[in-house]
Image (cartoon, rainbow, N blue to C red):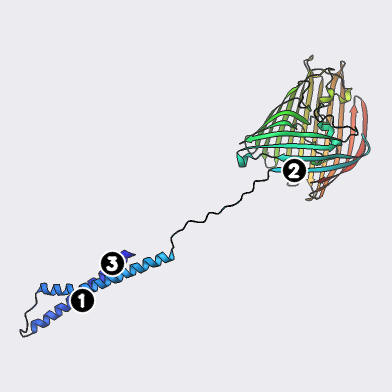
Amino acid sequence: MKRSIYGISAFIAGVLASCSLSGVSRANDILLDAEGESAVPTVESVMESAKVETAPAAESIQAETTAVSTTTAQAATETVPAETAAPVMVYQVKPERRFEFSGNAFATWWDGFGAGNSLNLDQIWLTGERAIDTETYGFDWGYRVDALFGTNDARCFNDGGFDGNWNPSNDGYVPSIYQIYAEVGVGNFSLKVGKFGTLIGYESVDVSDRLFNSTSYMYDHEPSTHCGGLLTYDMTEKLSFNFGITTGSDTSFENEDGDIGFLFGVGYQLTDSFYVGYAAHWASIHGGEDGDRSNNSYDYYDVFGGEPVGDHDEYLHTVTISWDITDRFNYSFVTNYGSMTPEYADSSVYDQFGIANYFSYELTEKLTLALRYEWFNQSAEIEGETADANYHDLSLGAVYRPTENIMIRPEIRYDWINEMGEEDEGFAGGIGVGFFF
């Protein structure tokens, strides 16, 4: 901006000087016509005179230019004030609440085949958890405790652990611990240490987390919990692996008989609507003092008289496929295989195999209809003879959630079975009501 003003000033000064020289030239012509009244001025004197006349004009222009520049600078200074340091704002950051507490209470009335007319408090289930968040924190730690009271606690007692004597009244309503573990994680890895739910099976121990009030035959012949450590690796957002070392199935921290097992699982989310999972558990089971551990071994020999098996190896796996056919319609297929091989034999003396199909359709946001069909088979060698049993069940139910805190779940079920040549069949049904908090 200043260069432009100086250029204009010089131009004006040049014009004024030119005008002054022109005036001198005209004056010189007049003097030449005069009759000797004075001497003719020289060119040097004329130029000197022009300089004298031009100088005040140039000085005036320079002064005006300086004044304009000063005014412009002042205006700029007034328009754009100098930056000043911003005030320091102090905020009080409250620590994030990481602990979560939740629970539910569930009661069921049931009558018909395989069960008498009964009304039971299935569970009062309480969960306290600090879940890990490695995506946000990188390294994180947490824990979880699931405790319950009610008839459903029978799945949680293990082999007489620290909560195995919490039933002073022997009326079927007992407090127990389903899960209690600590967890650490870093990046895509996490490790649980303690007592945790099994990877085997499809139906949940938590009654409120099922489609039906009744359970499948496969569920009744699967472990519920393990004690030990479980490592999880999320290789990608869709693929994850699990590997654990356990004290067998449904055992306690004490592990009085020295059982040891290995747990493995892999899950793959093939698409947003299609999932495939596999989980397996192998364990070396010791018979204990009396050699009979059948009651703590997936109930393998439940219909075969509970024959003592002594030291043996157990294997069980589950394959799960879940397909969201539409946004409302889901189909899940589950298959189960297990075997028991005593140390004295080269092959298994017990095998089980089952398949179950689950269909659910979300009729509205509050009402879901459900259908389950299952076939389950057991075969065993007892005293040199083979015993065989086949079970079928067909269940039709609904899950109604009038509010987020209330669940109403009616069900009707039909069973037909053949246990070692003896056939039986019948209907059963009931309704469950749950409250969530």
Question: On the rendered image, what quadrant is the N terminus found in?
Answer: bottom left
Q: Residue reaching furthest left?
A: 36
Q: CA distance from mark 3 to mark 2?
A: 80 Å
Which element carries disc 3, helix, strand or loop?
Answer: helix
Asked if marks 3 and 2 touch (Cβ < 8 Å), the reply is: no
Residue 51 falls in which quadrant of the image?
A: bottom left
Q: CA distance from mark 1 to mark 3?
A: 19 Å
Q: Is residue 101 left or right of residue 23?
A: right
Whether residue 433 is visible to the viewer of this picture, yes or no, is: yes
Q: Nearer the viewer, residue 213 or 37?
A: 37
Position in image of residue 381 (x %, y %): 85, 19
Q: Which mark is residue 7?
A: 3
| Secondary structure category for the residue under label 1 | helix
Residue wearing tag 1: 19
Residue 17 can be seen, yes or no: no
- Answer with mark 1 or mark 3, whichever residue precedes in sequence: 3
Residue assigned mark 2: 101
Residue 232 coordinates in the image, percent (x, y)? 66, 33
Disc 1 residue type?
A: Cys
Residue at horizontal 87%, vertical 42%? 107
Q: Is residue 186 left or right of residue 335?
A: left
